[in-house]
Image: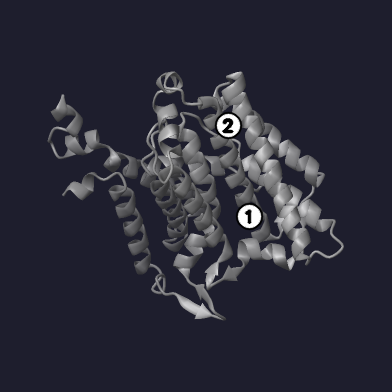
Amino acid sequence: MSFVRHRLFWPAAILVALLASNIFFSSGFFSITVHDGHLYGSIIDILRRSAPLILVGIGMTLVIATGGIDLSVGSVMAISGALACLLIGDLDNQNSVTGVLLACAAGIALSLVLGIWNGALVASIGIQPIIATLILMVAGRGIAQLITDGQILNVTSAPYKVIGAGYTIALPVSVLIAAGMVAIAVVLTRRTALGLLIEAVGGSPTASRLAGIQARRLTIMVYVFSAICAGIAGLIYSSNVSSADSNAAGNLIELDAILAVVIGGTRLTGGRFSLAGTVLGAVLIETLNVTTVSIGIPVETTLLFKAIVVIVLCLVQSAAFRAKVLRRPSRVGASA
């Protein structure tokens, strides 16, 4: 039963339970059909809806691994989408692929600058991460409002629509984008020494500094990566709805991202992290959202139901809680 002690066992078990529960309320929940070479079905919808949260979550994972936090990801999403839609709206031909790519690049570039801003406040000036990113969380919505002039910008660009609602090789483009960013993060952190350095900075900043690790540069780097991921997520969101809504884009997604990171087994205190766990946590959260609708949970009690599931998940993940319930010493107590 050693697999039960794996940090991803209980999130995976809860995810399977949630998916299985939908069978009783939607007979075709697991059915996947092919139409015009595209895959359709509830499972595909869950993956597509999870894409922005997965993107924001993997960026948040690396930030938390350094002992920080990024509350500005939702605002960065709004800013990125607003700038892209503004530039696309100014195009003579909104179906110009080159123009759309340049607009998207501008949104991501601005996100990169915002990431540098967050990283500089934390690493160079020494402001607490929660305060530094709270500044952009609040001001970012205002920046997005300035970009859109307080309006909802609608775009009719077919190439831009592909990012959030398009398909390629039978799968949603947004899912492939999220998978690509996860792959990049895995390669950078698990195939190079970067992951160990990030864990060292989060585990013991003083020891890592004494060991010659450039903690400030690494800290800025993870905030930049988090902002880029949020910027791409903002493009997916605005593309999916064909508009830039500065108030709705990324609203409270930072809380779901932190929750996905914690569900995935990464500690908020920093140190060891799990990208696979974060992806699993993001999919679990979106599955939970779909399940509440599927089983007919009233809208006014959806958040309460979600909180109960999260509490149960956190309890079963706790070795100390399981030890008390099963009336056996925990591993920590036994080793002591």
- Amino acid type, mark 1: Tyr
Circle 1: element type: helix
Rendering coords of residue 227 (x, y %): 61, 41
Within 10 angstroms of label 2, few (less than 14), some, or many (20 or more) residues? many
Task: Find residue 294 and report its image quarter.
Answer: bottom left
| Residue displayed at 48% across by 61% down | 46
Task: Find residue 23 and report its image quarter.
Answer: bottom left
Q: Decide if residue 27 is on the left or right side of residue 119.
A: left
- Quadrant housing the C terminus: top left
241 shown above or below 40? above
- Tell me how far mark 1 sits from mark 2, CA to CA: 26 Å
Rendering coords of residue 54 (x, y %): 50, 51
Rendering coords of residue 98 (x, y %): 76, 62
| Residue displayed at 33% across by 44% down | 313
Q: Nearer the viewer, residue 85 or 62?
A: 62
Q: Considering only order in the chain, which callout, 2 or 1, is on the residue closer to the N terminus?
A: 2
Q: How many marks?
A: 2
**Of all residues shown, which one is farthest toward the bottom?**
36
- Amino acid type, mark 2: Ile
| Residue displayed at 44% across by 54% down | 283
Task: Find residue 254 and report its image quarter.
Answer: top right
Q: Nearer the viewer, residue 301 or 212?
A: 212
| Residue displayed at 65% across by 48% down | 249
Rendering coords of residue 109 (x, y %): 70, 44
269 shown above or below 305? above
328 shown above or below 298? above
Q: Identify the residue position indicated by label 1 in the image.
A: 237
Coloration of the structure image: one colour
Q: Identify the residue position indicated by label 2 in the image.
A: 220
Within 10 angstroms of label 1, few (less than 14), some, or many (20 or more) residues? many
Give the number of the disc on residue 80.
none
